[in-house]
Image (cartoon, grey):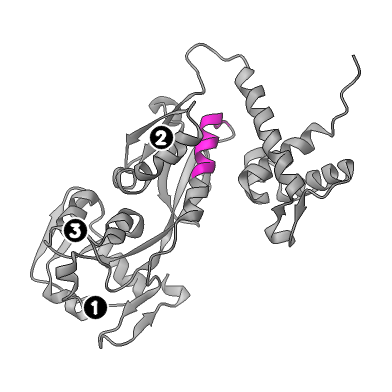
Amino acid sequence: MAARSLPPLNALRAFEAFGRRGRMTLAADELCVTHGAISRQIRQLEDHLGVALTEGPRNNLALTEAGATLAQALSQALDQIEAALPRPAGSGDGTLVVSCLPTFAMKWLIPRLPGFVAAHPDIQARIVESNGPFDFRADGVDLAIRMRLPDAPPSADADVTPFLKHYVGPVAAPELAARLRDVASLADLPRLHTRTFLESWAEWESAAGLEVPPTAVNREFDHYFYMLEAAAAGLGVALSPFAFAENDLASGRLVAPLGMIPGQAQVCALTPKGKATRAARRFRDWLVAEGAATPAPPGSQQLVDHDGAKPLTLSAAAL
């Protein structure tokens, strides 16, 4: 049998990771090499084939038509190889346990989940509720979704992939929102809080560079989704991440009359360091794509000033 005529396998692997992840840095993180190493491997592959696989500026490379065709074929081939690898009994790769913030799962993740199921019918995803610390092995978690600050120390046991920008602002039922003309009018309306994050209003004030006057009525709820239902019922004004209120804002159940500001944290996918399963990698890549397709909220980075006439544009330092 004639020897196979293949390019260097490391170059093929680097190119497949770039094609699947869409960014050199993400491909480098996945393969535990430098950005420059991925770039060199792709150039080596292009030289070997005599075909351009990428195009555009170096900081925003995209696949050419030939590159997209090759990347798709490589992903399918590597999936088949990975599926054929022998595994210990009980370690099937068709199952996926995702540990997720409960309100994020309810309001953002699960409404989008049919798209993942349709694209990956062989992967059985199970969403488990969790707000706190977790252990991949002890808790049987394949991927976790958490909020993290960009300058948080690197995780010793997890690869961290940000996939969604975080925005936050006051939301209320339309009837109540009609009375919310500016920040000062917050004093005239009941204010809602969640016990899982009682400091949210103070943090929002600090980020926006505002001083919100106190209100006579404060109502607390155990969870964000309880608080948001209370807001939709007209019980007061809630401070909510856009991801939690996106569908209610789109349907008109809730209104964000003062706009929303970017928060410091990011929504991130965490997988075991260097040991993510194929199912977890597919889910992580899907999360990145869904996050990129999620629009910023209307009126982001603006708040209505006290005179009700002009918006406050927040400085970078306040974000």
Q: Secondary structure at mark 2?
A: strand
Give the Cα separation between the discs numbered 2 and 1: 38 Å
Q: Identify the magenta region.
A: 275-286
Q: Residue at x 66, y 34 (%)?
A: 75
Taking depth in this image into account, of 98 and 84 the one nearest to the observer is 84
> Given this view, does label 2 or label 3 mark the residue nearer the observer?
2
Dot 2, crowdedness within 10 Å: few (<14), some or many (≥20)?
Answer: many
Q: Position of residue 216 (x, y in %)?
A: 8, 71
Q: Secondary structure at mark 3?
A: strand
Q: Position of residue 207 (x, y in %)?
A: 36, 70
Quick one: label 2 or label 3, which is nearer the N terminus?
Answer: 2
Please tell me the numbered disc located at residue 183. Answer: 1
From where the camera sits, is residue 194 visible?
no
- Residue lying furthest top in this view? 89
Pointer 2 and pointer 3: residues touching (CB < 8 Å)?
A: no
* Residue type at the position of mark 3: His
In the image, residue 74 sits, relative to residue 34, either above or below, namely: above
Taking depth in this image into account, of 265 and 171 the one nearest to the observer is 171
* Residue type at the position of mark 2: Val
Pointer 1 and pointer 3: residues touching (CB < 8 Å)?
A: no
Dot 3, crowdedness within 10 Å: few (<14), some or many (≥20)?
Answer: many
In the image, residue 195 sits, relative to residue 78, either above or below, namely: below
Q: Position of residue 312 (x, y in %)?
A: 36, 81
Tell me the quarter of the image containing the C terminus.
bottom left
Q: Position of residue 33 (x, y in %)?
A: 70, 42
- Which secondary structure is most common in the magenta stretch? helix
Say which quarter of the image contains residue 41.
top right
Quick one: label 1 or label 3, which is nearer the N terminus?
Answer: 1
State the residue position of label 2. 98
Please tell me the numbered disc located at residue 280. Answer: none
Horizontal side, residue 92 vs residue 9: left or right: left
State the residue position of label 3. 193
